[in-house]
Image (cartoon, rainbow, N blue to C red):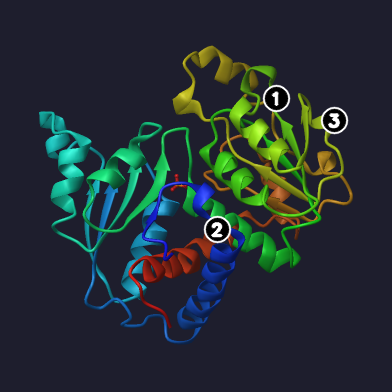
Amino acid sequence: MPLERLISARQLSVDVLHEIFDMARKMRTVCQETGRTNLLADKMIGLVFLEPSSRTLLSFQSAAQRLGAGIVFIQGVGSTSFEKGESLSDAIKVVSGYCDLIVARLPKSGDAQIASDASNVPFINAGDGGNEHPTQSLVDTFTIIEELGALSNLDYAFGFDPLQSRSIHSLCLVLSQFENVGFDFVSPPELKAPGWLIDQCRSRSVRVSESSSLKDLKDPDVIYLNRLQEERFPDRSLFEKYRYEYRLTPDQIPPATRLILDPLPRVDEIALTVDELPIAGYFRQAQNGVYIRMALLAMLLGRSL
Ligand code: CP
Protein backbone atom coordinates (compact mmCIF):
# COMPACT_ATOMS: atom_id res chain seq x y z
CA MET A 1 0.00 0.00 0.00
CA PRO A 2 1.47 3.43 -0.87
CA LEU A 3 2.59 5.58 2.07
CA GLU A 4 0.22 8.59 2.35
CA ARG A 5 0.77 9.66 5.94
CA LEU A 6 3.96 9.35 7.96
CA ILE A 7 3.21 9.49 11.69
CA SER A 8 5.65 6.97 13.14
CA ALA A 9 8.89 5.22 12.24
CA ARG A 10 6.94 1.98 12.85
CA GLN A 11 5.53 2.51 9.33
CA LEU A 12 9.01 2.40 7.77
CA SER A 13 9.48 -1.19 6.67
CA VAL A 14 12.77 -2.23 5.08
CA ASP A 15 11.14 -2.15 1.62
CA VAL A 16 9.79 1.38 2.15
CA LEU A 17 13.21 2.51 3.41
CA HIS A 18 14.96 1.28 0.30
CA GLU A 19 12.33 2.84 -1.96
CA ILE A 20 12.88 6.21 -0.24
CA PHE A 21 16.70 5.84 -0.35
CA ASP A 22 16.60 5.09 -4.10
CA MET A 23 14.49 8.19 -4.68
CA ALA A 24 16.74 10.29 -2.39
CA ARG A 25 19.79 9.34 -4.49
CA LYS A 26 17.96 10.55 -7.60
CA MET A 27 17.03 13.77 -5.79
CA ARG A 28 20.69 14.28 -4.84
CA THR A 29 21.61 14.01 -8.52
CA VAL A 30 18.95 16.61 -9.38
CA CYS A 31 20.36 18.96 -6.74
CA GLN A 32 23.90 18.47 -7.99
CA GLU A 33 23.15 18.72 -11.71
CA THR A 34 20.29 21.20 -12.17
CA GLY A 35 19.33 22.32 -8.67
CA ARG A 36 15.60 21.81 -9.18
CA THR A 37 12.84 20.04 -11.11
CA ASN A 38 9.18 20.75 -11.82
CA LEU A 39 7.98 17.42 -10.42
CA LEU A 40 5.63 19.12 -7.92
CA ALA A 41 5.06 22.38 -9.80
CA ASP A 42 1.27 21.96 -9.45
CA LYS A 43 1.43 21.27 -5.68
CA MET A 44 1.29 23.41 -2.56
CA ILE A 45 2.99 22.25 0.67
CA GLY A 46 1.70 23.43 4.09
CA LEU A 47 4.35 23.74 6.82
CA VAL A 48 2.87 23.98 10.33
CA PHE A 49 5.75 24.38 12.80
CA LEU A 50 4.57 25.11 16.33
CA GLU A 51 7.92 24.20 17.96
CA PRO A 52 11.34 25.70 17.10
CA SER A 53 13.21 24.14 14.18
CA SER A 54 16.06 25.07 11.86
CA ARG A 55 17.02 21.90 9.96
CA THR A 56 13.65 20.22 9.55
CA LEU A 57 11.84 23.42 8.57
CA LEU A 58 14.50 24.69 6.17
CA SER A 59 15.21 21.32 4.58
CA PHE A 60 11.48 20.80 3.93
CA GLN A 61 11.29 24.34 2.48
CA SER A 62 14.33 23.68 0.33
CA ALA A 63 12.97 20.27 -0.72
CA ALA A 64 9.56 21.69 -1.71
CA GLN A 65 11.08 24.56 -3.68
CA ARG A 66 13.64 22.35 -5.43
CA LEU A 67 10.67 20.24 -6.56
CA GLY A 68 8.90 23.34 -7.89
CA ALA A 69 6.13 23.32 -5.24
CA GLY A 70 4.67 26.37 -3.53
CA ILE A 71 4.65 26.76 0.26
CA VAL A 72 2.24 28.14 2.86
CA PHE A 73 3.41 28.12 6.46
CA ILE A 74 2.80 28.79 10.13
CA GLN A 75 5.97 29.24 12.19
CA GLY A 76 5.36 29.54 15.93
CA VAL A 77 1.97 30.17 17.50
CA GLY A 78 2.49 33.90 18.22
CA SER A 79 0.98 35.34 15.05
CA THR A 80 -1.71 32.71 14.51
CA SER A 81 -5.23 31.99 15.68
CA PHE A 82 -3.86 29.35 18.08
CA GLU A 83 -3.38 32.45 20.27
CA LYS A 84 -7.16 32.90 20.21
CA GLY A 85 -7.70 29.33 21.38
CA GLU A 86 -8.22 27.50 18.07
CA SER A 87 -7.81 23.73 18.41
CA LEU A 88 -5.12 21.78 16.56
CA SER A 89 -7.76 19.73 14.75
CA ASP A 90 -9.66 22.76 13.49
CA ALA A 91 -6.47 24.50 12.35
CA ILE A 92 -5.18 21.45 10.47
CA LYS A 93 -8.58 20.86 8.85
CA VAL A 94 -8.50 24.43 7.53
CA VAL A 95 -4.85 24.31 6.38
CA SER A 96 -5.55 21.06 4.52
CA GLY A 97 -7.94 23.07 2.35
CA TYR A 98 -5.09 25.39 1.37
CA CYS A 99 -2.49 22.82 0.31
CA ASP A 100 -1.87 19.31 -1.05
CA LEU A 101 0.29 17.97 1.82
CA ILE A 102 0.94 19.09 5.40
CA VAL A 103 4.24 18.80 7.29
CA ALA A 104 3.80 19.55 11.00
CA ARG A 105 6.07 19.90 14.03
CA LEU A 106 3.93 19.85 17.14
CA PRO A 107 4.69 20.29 20.84
CA LYS A 108 2.96 17.31 22.41
CA SER A 109 3.50 13.60 22.12
CA GLY A 110 0.54 12.19 20.18
CA ASP A 111 -0.30 15.51 18.44
CA ALA A 112 0.85 14.09 15.08
CA GLN A 113 -1.88 11.44 15.11
CA ILE A 114 -4.52 14.03 16.08
CA ALA A 115 -3.36 16.34 13.29
CA SER A 116 -3.18 13.59 10.68
CA ASP A 117 -6.71 12.46 11.59
CA ALA A 118 -7.93 16.03 11.00
CA SER A 119 -6.09 16.46 7.69
CA ASN A 120 -7.83 15.86 4.37
CA VAL A 121 -4.47 15.67 2.58
CA PRO A 122 -1.27 13.58 3.09
CA PHE A 123 0.50 14.37 6.35
CA ILE A 124 4.09 14.14 7.65
CA ASN A 125 5.07 14.20 11.32
CA ALA A 126 8.10 16.50 11.61
CA GLY A 127 8.45 15.78 15.35
CA ASP A 128 5.71 15.50 18.01
CA GLY A 129 6.99 16.45 21.46
CA GLY A 130 9.24 13.82 23.00
CA ASN A 131 7.59 11.02 21.05
CA GLU A 132 8.89 10.53 17.50
CA HIS A 133 10.73 12.17 14.60
CA PRO A 134 10.28 9.70 11.75
CA THR A 135 11.75 11.85 8.95
CA GLN A 136 14.91 12.28 11.04
CA SER A 137 15.22 8.49 11.24
CA LEU A 138 15.18 8.40 7.44
CA VAL A 139 17.92 11.04 7.29
CA ASP A 140 19.94 9.08 9.85
CA THR A 141 19.62 5.66 8.24
CA PHE A 142 20.29 7.10 4.78
CA THR A 143 23.48 8.68 6.13
CA ILE A 144 24.61 5.42 7.74
CA ILE A 145 24.01 3.40 4.59
CA GLU A 146 25.72 5.97 2.38
CA GLU A 147 28.74 6.17 4.70
CA LEU A 148 29.08 2.55 5.88
CA GLY A 149 27.22 0.61 3.17
CA ALA A 150 24.86 -1.24 5.55
CA LEU A 151 22.51 -0.94 8.50
CA SER A 152 22.78 -4.54 9.70
CA ASN A 153 25.67 -6.23 11.53
CA LEU A 154 26.52 -3.04 13.38
CA ASP A 155 26.77 -1.95 17.01
CA TYR A 156 25.24 1.40 17.84
CA ALA A 157 25.67 3.59 20.94
CA PHE A 158 22.92 6.13 21.69
CA GLY A 159 23.28 9.05 24.12
CA PHE A 160 22.64 11.03 26.13
CA ASP A 161 18.88 11.49 26.65
CA PRO A 162 17.23 8.37 25.26
CA LEU A 163 14.25 8.98 27.53
CA GLN A 164 13.20 12.22 25.83
CA SER A 165 14.95 12.18 22.44
CA ARG A 166 12.34 11.63 19.72
CA SER A 167 15.18 11.19 17.21
CA ILE A 168 16.62 8.26 19.19
CA HIS A 169 13.16 6.69 19.56
CA SER A 170 12.41 6.76 15.84
CA LEU A 171 15.90 5.67 14.79
CA CYS A 172 15.84 2.67 17.14
CA LEU A 173 12.41 1.64 15.84
CA VAL A 174 13.78 1.60 12.28
CA LEU A 175 17.15 -0.02 13.03
CA SER A 176 15.61 -2.75 15.20
CA GLN A 177 14.34 -4.40 12.00
CA PHE A 178 17.87 -5.18 10.84
CA GLU A 179 19.85 -8.36 11.44
CA ASN A 180 22.51 -8.64 14.10
CA VAL A 181 22.43 -5.14 15.59
CA GLY A 182 23.36 -4.08 19.12
CA PHE A 183 22.16 -0.93 20.92
CA ASP A 184 24.01 0.52 23.92
CA PHE A 185 22.07 3.36 25.58
CA VAL A 186 24.38 5.76 27.44
CA SER A 187 22.66 8.19 29.80
CA PRO A 188 22.30 9.46 33.35
CA PRO A 189 20.19 7.05 35.42
CA GLU A 190 17.19 9.42 35.32
CA LEU A 191 17.22 9.57 31.49
CA LYS A 192 17.31 5.89 30.56
CA ALA A 193 15.53 4.73 27.41
CA PRO A 194 11.79 4.21 27.97
CA GLY A 195 10.60 0.69 28.74
CA TRP A 196 8.42 0.52 25.63
CA LEU A 197 11.47 1.13 23.43
CA ILE A 198 13.67 -1.42 25.20
CA ASP A 199 10.85 -4.00 24.99
CA GLN A 200 10.34 -3.34 21.29
CA CYS A 201 14.07 -3.69 20.57
CA ARG A 202 14.40 -6.91 22.58
CA SER A 203 11.30 -8.39 20.94
CA ARG A 204 13.11 -7.96 17.63
CA SER A 205 16.27 -9.67 18.94
CA VAL A 206 18.37 -6.52 19.26
CA ARG A 207 21.27 -6.90 21.75
CA VAL A 208 20.42 -4.16 24.27
CA SER A 209 22.70 -2.80 26.98
CA GLU A 210 22.67 0.35 29.13
CA SER A 211 25.57 2.36 30.57
CA SER A 212 25.65 5.41 32.79
CA SER A 213 29.10 6.63 31.80
CA LEU A 214 30.96 7.42 28.60
CA LYS A 215 33.87 5.49 30.10
CA ASP A 216 31.80 2.31 29.73
CA LEU A 217 31.25 2.77 25.98
CA LYS A 218 31.57 -0.59 24.31
CA ASP A 219 33.23 -0.55 20.89
CA PRO A 220 30.38 0.78 18.74
CA ASP A 221 30.54 1.16 14.98
CA VAL A 222 28.23 4.18 15.19
CA ILE A 223 27.88 6.70 18.02
CA TYR A 224 24.58 8.60 17.79
CA LEU A 225 24.30 11.54 20.17
CA ASN A 226 21.52 14.01 20.82
CA ARG A 227 21.58 16.93 23.26
CA LEU A 228 19.84 16.66 26.62
CA GLN A 229 16.34 17.82 25.71
CA GLU A 230 16.39 20.93 27.88
CA GLU A 231 12.85 22.04 27.07
CA ARG A 232 11.37 18.70 28.18
CA PHE A 233 12.88 18.51 31.69
CA PRO A 234 10.21 18.86 34.39
CA ASP A 235 13.05 19.68 36.80
CA ARG A 236 15.65 22.09 35.34
CA SER A 237 18.21 21.28 38.03
CA LEU A 238 18.50 17.79 36.54
CA PHE A 239 19.45 19.27 33.16
CA GLU A 240 22.06 21.54 34.77
CA LYS A 241 23.45 18.61 36.76
CA TYR A 242 24.32 16.59 33.66
CA ARG A 243 24.73 19.00 30.74
CA TYR A 244 28.55 19.20 30.92
CA GLU A 245 29.17 15.72 32.32
CA TYR A 246 27.90 14.02 29.18
CA ARG A 247 30.10 15.44 26.41
CA LEU A 248 32.00 13.40 23.84
CA THR A 249 35.64 14.41 23.38
CA PRO A 250 38.12 12.84 20.89
CA ASP A 251 39.94 10.86 23.61
CA GLN A 252 36.68 9.10 24.59
CA ILE A 253 35.97 7.69 21.14
CA PRO A 254 36.70 3.96 20.97
CA PRO A 255 39.19 3.06 18.20
CA ALA A 256 36.77 0.94 16.15
CA THR A 257 34.16 3.69 15.86
CA ARG A 258 33.41 4.41 12.20
CA LEU A 259 30.80 7.16 12.32
CA ILE A 260 29.52 9.79 14.76
CA LEU A 261 26.08 11.24 14.11
CA ASP A 262 23.89 13.84 15.82
CA PRO A 263 20.53 15.10 14.50
CA LEU A 264 21.62 18.56 15.78
CA PRO A 265 21.33 21.18 17.12
CA ARG A 266 24.55 20.42 19.03
CA VAL A 267 24.65 22.07 22.43
CA ASP A 268 27.00 20.45 24.94
CA GLU A 269 27.03 16.80 23.88
CA ILE A 270 29.93 16.88 21.38
CA ALA A 271 33.14 18.86 21.87
CA LEU A 272 34.03 21.11 18.93
CA THR A 273 37.34 19.25 18.53
CA VAL A 274 35.41 16.14 17.39
CA ASP A 275 34.34 18.05 14.26
CA GLU A 276 37.84 17.71 12.80
CA LEU A 277 37.65 13.89 12.69
CA PRO A 278 36.66 12.32 9.35
CA ILE A 279 34.21 10.06 11.22
CA ALA A 280 32.25 13.13 12.42
CA GLY A 281 29.31 12.84 10.02
CA TYR A 282 26.72 15.18 11.53
CA PHE A 283 27.00 18.02 9.04
CA ARG A 284 26.84 15.59 6.10
CA GLN A 285 23.82 14.05 7.87
CA ALA A 286 22.05 17.45 7.98
CA GLN A 287 22.74 17.94 4.25
CA ASN A 288 21.08 14.60 3.49
CA GLY A 289 17.88 16.01 4.99
CA VAL A 290 17.09 17.82 1.75
CA TYR A 291 17.37 14.71 -0.47
CA ILE A 292 15.34 12.56 1.91
CA ARG A 293 12.62 15.17 2.30
CA MET A 294 12.43 15.72 -1.48
CA ALA A 295 11.96 11.96 -1.84
CA LEU A 296 9.27 11.87 0.85
CA LEU A 297 7.27 14.77 -0.58
CA ALA A 298 7.34 13.18 -4.03
CA MET A 299 6.43 9.73 -2.73
CA LEU A 300 3.52 10.87 -0.57
CA LEU A 301 2.16 12.85 -3.52
CA GLY A 302 2.44 9.84 -5.81
CA ARG A 303 5.20 11.22 -8.04
CA SER A 304 8.47 9.70 -9.10
CA LEU A 305 11.50 10.72 -11.15
N1 CP B 1 17.27 17.60 13.76
C1 CP B 1 16.26 18.49 13.93
O1 CP B 1 15.09 18.13 14.03
O2 CP B 1 16.68 19.77 13.99
P1 CP B 1 15.70 21.03 14.09
O3 CP B 1 15.06 20.96 15.47
O4 CP B 1 16.58 22.23 13.92
O5 CP B 1 14.67 20.89 13.02
Q: Position of residue 231 (x, y in %)?
A: 44, 27
Label 1 or label 2, whichever comes before in sequence order: 2
Q: Position of residue 110 (x, y in %)?
A: 38, 34
Helix, strand or loop under label 2? helix
Q: Position of residue 16 (x, y in %)?
A: 54, 64
Q: Which disc number belongs to residue 139?
A: 2
Label 2 or label 3, whichever comes before in sequence order: 2
Q: Which disc number belongs to residue 245?
A: 1
**Residue 102 versus residue 18: which sits nearer the camera?**
18
Helix, strand or loop under label 3? helix
Q: Does the residue labelled 3 lie within 8 Å of ligand 1?
A: no
Amino acid type, label 3: Asp
Q: Position of residue 257 (x, y in %)?
A: 82, 51
Q: What's the residue at 64%, 21% (across, down)?
A: 242
Q: Is mark 2 within 8 Å of ligand 1?
A: yes
Q: Gap between marks 2 and 3, in whole Å?
A: 28 Å
Kindly indicate the quadrant of the structure image that contains residue 115: top left
**Residue 238 versus residue 276: which sits nearer the camera?**
238
Residue 120 visible in image: yes
Amino acid type, label 2: Val
Q: Gap between marks 1 and 2, in whole Å?
A: 28 Å
Neighbor class of circle 2 (other Cα within 10 Å; few <14, some 14-19, many 20+) is many
Please give left or right for residue 204 compared with residue 56 in the image.
right
Amino acid type, label 1: Glu
Please give left or right for residue 207 compared with residue 110 in the image.
right
Q: Which of marks 1 and 2 is in front?
A: 2
Helix, strand or loop under label 1? loop
Q: What's the residue at 59%, 29% (across, down)?
A: 196
Label 3 or label 1, whichever comes before in sequence order: 3
Q: Which disc number belongs to residue 216?
A: 3
Q: What's the residue at 49%, 49% (across, down)?
A: 134
